[in-house]
Amino acid sequence: MATVLQMNTKLALEGIFDQIMGEDETIRQKGLEYVCGTLMDMKQKLFDAHPENEEFLFLLIKKVLLQYLCMTVRVYIHLQGISWLSVYS
């Protein structure tokens, strides 16, 4: 994976984050561990020398955070029994 990251960082990051945003909890956990560990160990090669890769990484992180924020809000609304109609009334 390290070789792929060095050859095409953006494409490799997209693949990793697609796995993180997937349904399989085990794969998501492994993806997060990879990002937090191995990927950060390669920070100097991948991001310090190429700021556009770092910016792309931040965009992917924001995307994941937004997905889980929206999911959390939906679950909260469902658990509270709040109707969308009552929210806008």
Image (spheres, rainbow, N blue to C red):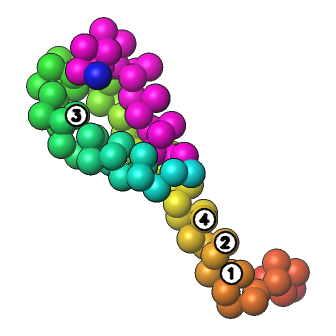
Query: What amino acid type is highlighted by mark number 3?
Result: Leu
Secondary structure of the residue carrying numbered label 4: helix
Measured as percent of width and height from the top left, residue 48 is found at: 16, 25
Kindly tell me whether residue 33 is visible in this rendering: yes
**Do tag 2 and tag 4 residues touch (Cβ < 8 Å)?**
yes
- Identified by mark 4, the residue type is Met
Percent across and percent down for residue 31 are 35, 43
Q: Nearer the viewer, mark 1 or mark 3?
A: 3
Name the residue rendered at 46%, 29% in the picture. 14
Q: Pointer 1: residues within 10 angstroms few (<14), some, or many (20+)?
A: few
Q: Are marks 2 and 1 in contact (CB under 8 Å)?
A: yes
At horizontal 41% and vertical 52% (from top left) the residue drawn is 26
Establish if 53 lies above or below 74: above
Q: Which mark is residue 39?
A: 3
> How far apart are the two marked residues, 1 and 3, measured between alpha carbons?
36 Å
The stretch in magenta equals 2-22
Q: Main secondary structure of the magenta part?
A: helix
Residue 88 appears anywhere in the view: no
CA neighbours of label 4 inside 10 A, class few (<14), some (14 to 19), many (20+)? few
Name the side, left or right, on which 7 lies relative to 82.
left
Q: Which residue is mark 1?
A: 77
What is the CA distance from the residue labelled 4 to the residue labelled 1? 10 Å
Q: Is residue 41 magenta?
A: no
Q: Which mark is first along the chain, 1 or 4? A: 4
33 with respect to 67 (left or right): left
Regarding mark 2 in the picture, which secondary structure is present there? helix
Callout 3: SS: helix
Q: Is residue 6 magenta?
A: yes
Task: Identify residue type, mark 2.
Answer: Arg
> Which residue has dot 4 on it?
71
Above or below residue 49? Residue 41 is below
